[in-house]
Amino acid sequence: MNGPSACRMSGLKILVAGGSIGGLATAVALKAQGHYVTVYEQALTPDTLGAGITIFPNSLRALDALGIDTNQIKSVRIKRLIRTSIEVDGSANTVGDEIEEKDWPWYQTTYRDLFVSLWEAAHDSSRPGPRIDVVSSKSVISIDPVKAMVYFSDGTQAVGDAIIGADGVHSVCRSFVPGGSFPRFRIKRHVFRALIPRERLAKDPRTIKFIEKEGDAYCYIYQERSLLITPASNGENCCIKFLYEDRMAFKNLSKDWRDPSSKLKLLRLADGLPEECMALFEKISDRDLQDQPIWDMDPLTTFRSNRMVLMGDAAHPMPPYCGQRIAMALEDALALGVLLETATPASEVDERLMLYSATRKTRAVAVQKTMRGLSESDMRNFATEFEAYSFHNYILGHDELEHMAQALRVWKKQRCLTQGSSESLEPRQQRPAQVWKECDEDKKKKAPQPMSPSPKKWWSIGRQGSKTWSRVFSSAETPRSVATTS
Ligand SMILES: Cc1cc2nc3c(=O)[nH]c(=O)nc-3n(C[C@H](O)[C@H](O)[C@H](O)COP(=O)(O)OP(=O)(O)OC[C@H]3O[C@@H](n4cnc5c(N)ncnc54)[C@H](O)[C@@H]3O)c2cc1C
């Protein structure tokens, strides 16, 4: 056995670059398997700046598997969506849709509440597994994926059995995978996000309606701009997401979540929205406002380089629709926890990370492309062509725990038969037919069948003809993704 784990009884030494949602979720998943995880975060202090996050069923399942429930993230279930479409002449049309949990489980949380829950889980000594070390103010400047070494801006370095690149959209680790230096780009849409404390809205008769009824969400559509107002933090906060067309899309290519934003710009762009919306915007304090570009990138061909893999935004930045950017980061974290199971020998890390890359890439890239398609069609206002059924089943009905456990079972069987040949992890046709026959039978027995209706599955929303995705969110006048930008 090589590497730092050679002298330990069990447990790999895993270095995670980036300590946001993806990095912390990965650390929690790996700790549970008995690994020694160190998270290196460039920020000086834990950064809880951020606003609303949509939690749909696949995120809920991933959080549940990480031992985090909807109460811990102080989420609020959305029970009614009130949509107002405003015409150029100023006339407005408002409709309300009741949202039943069995049809459409939609929760809203905030970046802060999700981050804090993961942070607490990572530091919870009652959870089984070794202590997680989170080192802040530690900037990764380079890595050696073969030796699993990380180099920091302060001149120090660390060595482990594996590196997880969870360093976000401007990832340093990404440049070490083939094709990882291809440019990321911004779509022509920006999003303003903000949090407003409930009491500020309660004092003003123009804004009180936004907090009056628990679980009410509001959506305004006006000339390529849209505003979503949702409750979060157990109703203590109101989240604002204001999407607008960005005509300066190629400026500020490295803009970060922490960069300051301009309220003046927000008010100028919001001109034309009803008085209650302008009153709402006035109540945002400057420090709680973010003006974010939306990043995208052509899919990578692999998420791995030797003993380093990418996860979250570093692997698949995508338009933040339907809460799937965060969902994919949580699924990646779970997948790593399943693959690097308890007592994984250091000698198998390479191959298991290869399996992670092959398996996660297929799904994440499909979701990435769907989200890109949705966001583009939304901008052109033909989002109604979107196929709700496969969205429900493939994206929201996914269970990563089962998915990756199945992939691991197949890999183990295959490995037994091929006696450790790592080549066989690549395309399916290269694998021995016998293994696949066996695995397919095994799959039929054990794997979940997300494409077939199952009344037991609580996420089987929209299948039985009650409220579907399209009925809840779309109409000719209202692009549905407005309501679901995470
Ligand atoms: C402060 C903050 C606030 C956010 N708020 C929201 C929000 O309100 N709504 C929403 O939908 N999404 C928000 N996001 C984005 C969301 O967290 C991600 O899109 C998604 O969860 C995927 O997470 P990630 O961990 O892969 O990437 P990110 O969340 O981008 O995290 C990457 C982390 O890596 C760190 N990092 C980057 N480079 C290095 C380096 N070289 N060395 C060490 N550390 C490094 C960054 O500081 C960051 O903490 C926010 C992200 C951040 C960082």
Image (cartoon, rainbow, N blue to C red):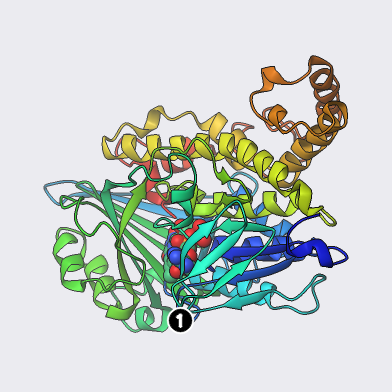
99 left or right of 443 in image: left
Residue 2: quarter of image: bottom right
The residue lying toward the viewer, choosing from 253 and 385, is: 253
Residue 479's place in the image compared with 138, above or below, is above
Q: Which structural element holds mark 1? A: loop
- What's the residue type where badge 1 is placed? Leu
Residue at 44%, 53% (x, y): give it: 81
Residue 114's place in the image compared with 441, above or below, is below
User: Ligand 1 within 8 A of label 1's CB?
Assistant: no
Q: Which residue is mark 1?
A: 44
Mark 1 neighbour class, 10 Å CA radius: few under 14, some 14 to 19, many 20 or more? few
The residue lying toward the viewer, choosing from 90 and 322, is: 322
155 left or right of 134 in image: left
Image quadrant in which the N terminus is located: bottom right
x, y percentage for residue 385? 40, 27
Residue 285 shows in the view: no
Image quadrant in which the C terminus is located: bottom left
Residue 377: quarter of image: top left
Residue at 76%, 61% (x, y): give it: 12
x, y percentage for residue 180? 43, 44
Residue 128's place in the image compared with 169, above or below, is below
x, y percentage for residue 327? 56, 51
Q: Residue furthest left?
A: 89
Residue 343's place in the image compared with 440, above or below, is below
Residue at 34%, 76% (x, y): give it: 288
300 left or right of 355 in image: left
Q: How many marks?
A: 1
Residue at 82%, 70% (x, y): give it: 128
Residue 399: quarter of image: top right
x, y percentage for residue 55? 55, 56
Residue 207 shows in the view: yes
